[in-house]
Amino acid sequence: MDKKVLEYVVEKTNELINAPSCSSETKASAEEWLAAVGTEQEAEATKKYISDLEGDIMPVDMLIGFAESEAGAKVFGGTEAAVGVAAHAKKIKAGGAAYCDCPACAAVEDILERKGEILA
């Protein structure tokens, strides 16, 4: 991987790890990848990391459905908050967003936009 691309992915990975919305599974995957950078395992770890990120990013339609559910109300701190999340998700979808725009998903989306360069 090109040095500038690597630096970018490391920066975005650190943003992901520090995002309050980052799941424990995604954080573990990010930390495993960082630990492999510069080792013989880097290429294989990079493939796994990208695969994990592709599975973890939340499509905006899924976010809307979740926010409008009872489970979403529990996670987001009540019905009113969940309604607000759903409304926000509908607004960003109308603006062309494909994914949730929370800090974790935004970092993942930034990384995945460079997937071709990362896996080259």
Image: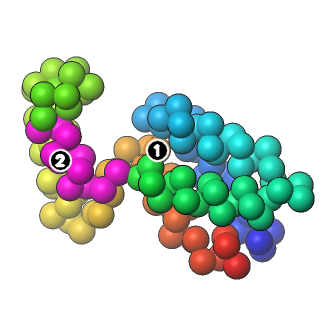
Residue at position x 62%, y 55% in the image? 49
Query: Mark 2 or mark 1: which comes first in sequence?
Result: 2
5 left or right of 88 in image: right
Task: Point out residue 108 in the picture as x, y percentages from the top left corner.
Answer: 50, 54
Task: Point out residue 63 in the picture as x, y percentages from the top left corner.
Answer: 24, 47
Residue at position x 51%, y 70% in the image? 113
Residue type at the position of mark 1: Ala
Main SS class of the magenta portion in the image: helix
Q: Which residue is mark 1?
A: 104
Residues drawn in magenta: 58-68
Q: Is residue 48 above or below residue 13?
A: below
Residue at position x 53%, y 31% in the image? 24
Query: Could one spot residue 19 in this view of the protein?
Result: no
Q: Is residue 109 above or below residue 69?
A: below
Q: CA distance from mark 2 to mark 1?
A: 17 Å
88 left or right of 13 in image: left
Task: Point out residue 72 in the picture as x, y percentages from the top left corner.
Answer: 20, 31
Observer-side mark, 2 or 1, equals 2
Q: Which residue is mark 2?
A: 64
The answer to whether the residue labelled 2 contacts the one labelled 1, judged by CB atoms less than 8 Å apart, is no
